[in-house]
Image (cartoon, rainbow, N blue to C red):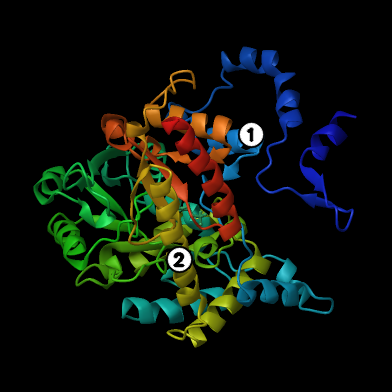
Amino acid sequence: MPRLTSLKSLYRLSSRSSSFLPAANVIPSSSFQWGQRHTRSVETMASSKLKAAEHLKGLEGSVWVEFVKLTTEEKAINLGQGFPDFAPPNSVTQALTEILAPGSNPLMNQYTRSYGHARLVNAIAAMYSKFIGREVDPMTGVLVSVGAYGSLYYAINSHVNPGDEVIIIEPFFDCYEPMVRMARGVPRFIPLRPKNEGVTSTRDFYLDKEELKGLFNKKTKAIIVNNPNNPLGKIFSEEELTVIADLCKEHDVMCISDEVYEHLVYSGNKFTRMASLPGMWDRTITVCSAGKIFSATGWKLGWSIGPQHLIKNSQTLHQNCVYNCPTLIQEAVARGLELEFSRLGQPECYFLELPRELEEKRNKMEKVLKESSFIPIIPEGGYFMMAKYGHLGVDVSAYGDGPQDYKMVRYLTKTQGVATIPCSAFYSAEHKSLGEPYIRFCFIKEDCTIDKAAEKLKAFSKSLKA
Ligand SMILES: Cc1ncc(COP(=O)(O)O)c(C=O)c1O
């Protein structure tokens, strides 16, 4: 019964309820074997017309595919992929329970409006009208997508023509580059540079104004800004954003502003929305994520906000490939946003509660990494911390191919049972060496998870000194 065998690995037996519970992030090794049985015929077909389209060439690899699989195989403590190991707030889980309760509206299980469930786009428009400081139209200024990923894909693929250049600031969330290439666009990269060798805060990473200016030209269609940035955790100051905005206006360029970590801003830092800067609303698509806002990445819901003349292009792409996102999830997120919006600015609002808790976790992670002899770069926002490891002098040459940080991550996962992510994955081929000295730790985890990782990392550090 091969199907049964493969399903078994997807589920683990719950000791409490003795029912089968889906194991999140588990990759069924048996389904992999199932695929291999067909290898020969697939290879034969690959030499015929049954080949991938040209625009997928070179995009096969993914840092997530390799390291999520490795983390699962090694049963390592997961400080790699960016998701919490604690429950989302009641504002959304309770809402979902009510929506699913017997006797509730059966239409919640059916298709809804393509560009976004009415209750959700109304909630989004009301909230971001306040955040951005201008009227956002719920019907023409919002598009609900499958995660922020969906909105990024739409923004890029509904505007970029073959040969158009798209400026990407490094380090960047790794899907930007393949998305630009799928549109046959040309990515142009510019790294955030550390002010000096010994920087310890993301505040000390800067965008060189002249270097940026040099990238703008007649072919430049768009720039992608991720603020707060993943993996660095930098929050761009209003002054830095204004430099980018002025260049966008001067060269008639659109801005895709990925603001998925919009509420994760730590003490002493101010988050400015690109769309709120003078003259930028008309040329900016802001990308957000319910998964990040509500600690529910598996709900996979996001949205784009912007002027009608840009959002309508994303809407066209969406209506022809996804059509609409799950109604239940949209309704639950709508109710959650309504509740949190009603208590905006109050300590119990999740938009304040989560960063308050995360700031403590950030400080805890900083301490753990320092005590384990890593050199962390302290983030101003987001939930990742980059850290240097080279000075530890670990021999990782036996841990596969590729850049040093990939080997270090494999080494730590396999020998110490702590999974992280290599930072060169967030840089273009031409600038990989800038990311190679760092690995990324995710700290949106239960304290006990960080404590368990701390024990292992400290023991590792001690063993190096022995
Ligand atoms: C900067 C950034 N943008 C977009 C995404 C994707 O978000 P979603 O899970 O909502 O698709 C992520 C996820 O980690 C991210 O870090």
Residue 360 shows which numbered tag? 2
Q: Disc 1 and disc 2: Cα gap in Å? A: 28 Å
| Picture quadrant where residue 188 is located | top left
Mark 2 residue element: helix
Identified at 11% across, 48% down, the residue is 213
| Observer-nearest of 186 and 321 | 186
In the rendered structure, which amino acid carries the disc numbered 1? Answer: Glu
379 relative position to 346: left or right = left
* Label 1 vs 2, first from the N-terminus: 1
For label 1, being within 8 Å of ligand 1 is answered no
Task: Classify residue 280 by image quadrant.
Answer: bottom left
The reply, left or right, for residue 314 in relation to residue 110 is left
Seen from the viewer's position, the closer of residues 237 and 281 is 237
Q: Residue 74 bears which disc, if any?
A: 1
Q: Nearer the viewer, mark 1 or mark 2?
A: 2
Q: Secondary structure at mark 1?
A: helix
Residue at screen point 49% across, 43% down: 458
Density class for disc 2 (Cα within 10 Å; few <14, some 14-19, many ≥20) is: some
